[in-house]
Amino acid sequence: MFMITGPGSPSVYPRANSWYMGANVPGKPRVLMPYAGGVGAYRKRCDEVAAKGYEGFALSV
């Protein structure tokens, strides 16, 4: 999970009290959902997961 939340931590997003963090939904945990580590790192990780048969995903037909 740190791969998702870690890169966005130093940004202003975690401090924002907005819909982007889920603050508009009572009781919902405030979580940064978009990947903030850059498109290059994101694409690399996607390629790694795909090369391993979509490791971590439960696929059905």
Image (tube, rainbow, N blue to C red):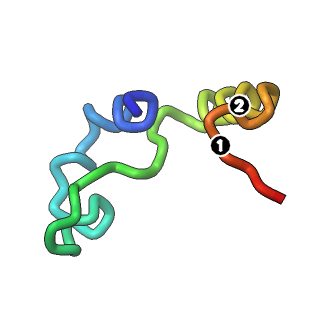
Residue at the spot of label 1: 57
Q: Which image quadrant is residue 55 in?
A: top right
Residue 24 spot, x, y in % from top left: 21, 74
Quadrant occupied by the C terminus? bottom right
Secondary structure state at the residue bearing disc 2:
helix
Count neighbours of disc 1 (C-alpha within 10 A) and say few if under 14, some if 14 to 19, many if 20 or more. few
Secondary structure at badge 1 equals: loop
Judge left or right: residue 3 versus residue 39. Answer: left
x, y percent for residue 57:
65, 43
Up/down of 41 relative to 35, above or below: above
In the image, which is nearer the foreground, mark 1 or mark 2?
1
Q: Earlier in the sequence, mark 1 or mark 2?
A: 2
- Residue 3 percent location from the top left of the image: 45, 29
Q: Is residue 57 left or right of residue 35?
A: right
Task: Answer whether labels 1 and 2 touch (C-beta < 8 Å).
Answer: yes
Q: Whole-Å distance between the Cαs marked 1 and 2?
A: 9 Å
Counting from the top left corner in percent of width and height, residue 7 is at: 38, 31
Q: Residue at x 48, y 43 (%)?
A: 35
- Tell me the kind of residue under disc 2: Val
Give the residue at mark 2. Answer: 49
Q: Residue at x 27, y 34 (%)?
A: 9
The answer to which quarter of the image holds residue 19 is: bottom left
Q: Nearer the viewer, residue 60 or 4?
A: 60
Along the line of sight, which residue is nearer the eye, 50 or 13?
50
Q: Of 28 and 32, which appears nearest the observer?
A: 28
Kind of residue indicated by mark 1: Phe
Q: Residue at x 77, y 55 (%)?
A: 60
